[in-house]
Amino acid sequence: MDRPAEVSFTPAVPGQVPGPVQAGTGWLQPGGLVVHTGWHRPLAVEQGSAYRQGPASEGWQSWRISTPDGHEVACFRYYQRADAEQAASVIAAALPGGIWPADARGDTAMVSGSLYQQAFDASTGPDLLPHTDSKGRPDWGYGAEWITWRLPPTRALYERMIAKHGGSAPATCLSCRESTRRARRADWLPRTGHWPRWGSRAHPPGTERRAHCHCEACLEFVTIGALGEATDEQGQTVPGAWSSCTLSPIRDNGREVALAVRPFTWFSRALTENGHVIMDNRPCVGLWPRGVRHDDAFLCETGIVGDSDFAQ
């Protein structure tokens, strides 16, 4: 077969999904993989509870790449069928013999096996991104907010994907490029937080995410503050401290600082105002880490927290 052929296709859905799954159609590629649109449950009750195939939608990553037995095998989904077919050919070419074997399965055992991992690894390269810039070059776009992708099945493949895309701040992500450039001009060593955390507790393998994840597991809330003086109830000056979060709103020159720049602004403000900065990535009450004994705490001699007007 040297051209895609329309075939009957049914995706493999998780066992906990309620309702039957209706068969649909896909396009069997010369490399043995199938390109198809997604399945969903109808919104209208009168249409029943069966999962059925949806059409391709303009502006959405509608086209997917799966094994013939219905297991999605590619990292990215695509806006156009032609792009998905091109990606499927690249993935198949990386497999032994240049084809997904007709008798191979994409079930749980295969997901943890070398063939599935080879296929997924081949799908993670920057040349297979579903978005292109004005010159037709693959890129994440500014902010990378519209491209979704599936986390690799193993941590090793996750690290390989990050390395392929240029590390923690991919050159093809305009948002990361700009924030990194500004930070380095100010002599910072920036970490952009471009990639969602990989792991069973944060984002399990196969989870569909965007490149910049703003969930609690990925943002890593860090307490920032400084020691100083405060006034007690009797009007006496006593040792004190102020604290905030590196991602808390803060204003600079009368304007609210963007989320990506807030940690730098908080740090610079604290250093300028107090001459020192204290940061702690453990859960804290004020500057006091929770669950830490009194004589082990870094700030064991402070107990009064002063109000901060830094956010004003």
Image (cartoon, grey):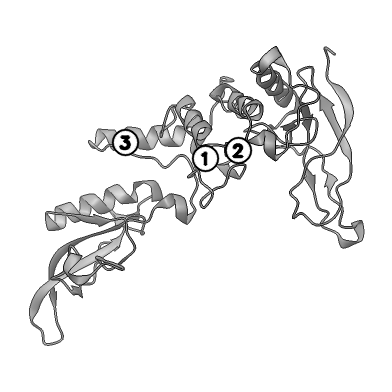
Q: Position of residue 43 (x, y in %)?
A: 81, 57
User: Is residue 79 rendered to the left or right of residue 150?
Assistant: right
Looking at marks 1 and 2 on the same chain, the residue that comes earlier in the sequence is marked by: 2
Tell me which residue sits at (35%, 40%) in the image: 191
CB under 8 Å between callouts 1 and 2? yes
| Of marks 3 and 2, the one in the foreground | 2
Q: Nearer the viewer, residue 278 or 262?
A: 278
Q: Amino acid at mark 1?
A: Ala
Residue on which the image places disc 3: 182
Residue on which the image places disc 2: 149
Above-or-below relation of 299 to 33: below
Q: Nearer the viewer, residue 307 or 295?
A: 295
Marks 3 and 2, Cα distance to the nearest angstrom? 28 Å
Q: Is residue 235 visible?
A: yes
Q: Quadrant of residue 10?
A: top right
Tell me which residue sits at (31%, 50%) in the image: 263
Q: Is residue 134 visible?
A: no
Residue on which the image places disc 1: 211
Q: Position of residue 32 (x, y in %)?
A: 78, 21
Q: Residues within 10 Å of mark 1 (few under 14, many from 20)?
A: some
Q: Position of residue 185 (x, y in %)?
A: 26, 33
- Mark 2 falls on what kind of element? strand
Q: Amino acid at mark 3?
A: Arg
Looking at marks 1 and 3 on the same chain, the residue that comes earlier in the sequence is marked by: 3
Q: Amino acid at mark 2?
A: Trp
User: Is residue 171 rendered to the left or right of residue 148?
Assistant: left
